[in-house]
Amino acid sequence: MQGNLPPEAQEKIEELQDLQETAQQVAMQKQQAETQLEDAETALDELDDIEADATMYREVGELLVKTEYDEAQDDLEEKVSNLEVRVETLQKQEDRVQEQFESLQSELEEMLGGAGGAGGPAPGGA
């Protein structure tokens, strides 16, 4: 069906497909960051229930390394803060990609409505 479309419309369709792929990648990254954020917040909440002089370990690659309460708390708070910024950034990126997608989709619909014209605009034509 794309063979009957003007080259400009084919380009728009390819751009739409690229944007859709980008949107899926951003959504996956955002979901991963949200999961990591939830895990870090849970760990920080659990830290509140632990006494400050308790022996603690943190994971460093394949190893568990002894750490101090204050250091663990600082690390988790920094991780939570960084992940909050990452989720917010990915949300903005997701919103921008969605806006671009909708704009491009409208352009394509106008292009096809003006070029294909068998009796008016076809809703859901492509």
Image (spheres, rainbow, N blue to C red):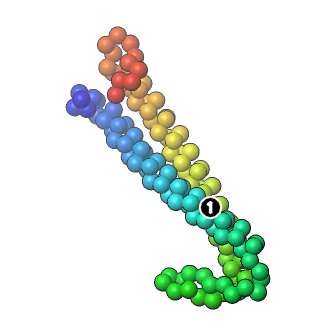
Question: Front-most of 111 and 21?
Answer: 21
Q: In this rendering, is residue 47 above or below 53?
A: above
Q: In this rendering, is residue 71 above or below 28?
A: below
Name the residue carrying label 1.
Answer: 38
Question: Front-most of 35 and 112?
Answer: 35
Q: Is residue 12 left or right of residue 33?
A: left
Q: Is residue 2 left or right of residue 74?
A: left
Q: Indicate the quadrant containing the N terminus: top left, top right, bottom left or bottom right.
A: top left
On the image, the x and y values in percent for residue 38 come to 62, 61
On the image, the x and y values in percent for residue 88 come to 63, 55
Question: Front-most of 8 and 109?
Answer: 109
For image coordinates 59% across by 50% down, the residue present is: 92
Q: Is residue 110 left or right of residue 7?
A: right
For image coordinates 77% across by 80% down, the residue present is: 51
For image coordinates 38% across by 18% down, the residue present is: 122
Asked which quadrant contains residue 17, the reply is: top left
Asked which quadrant contains residue 111, the reply is: top left
On the image, the x and y values in percent for residue 119 come to 35, 10
Q: In this rendering, is residue 84 above or below 120?
A: below
For image coordinates 25% across by 32% down, the residue present is: 2
Question: Front-most of 18 and 63?
Answer: 63
Residue 13 seen in the figure: yes
Q: Secondary structure at mark 1?
A: helix
Question: Hey, what amino acid is under mark 1?
Answer: Glu
Residue 78 seen in the figure: no
Q: In this rendering, is residue 19 above or below 13?
A: below
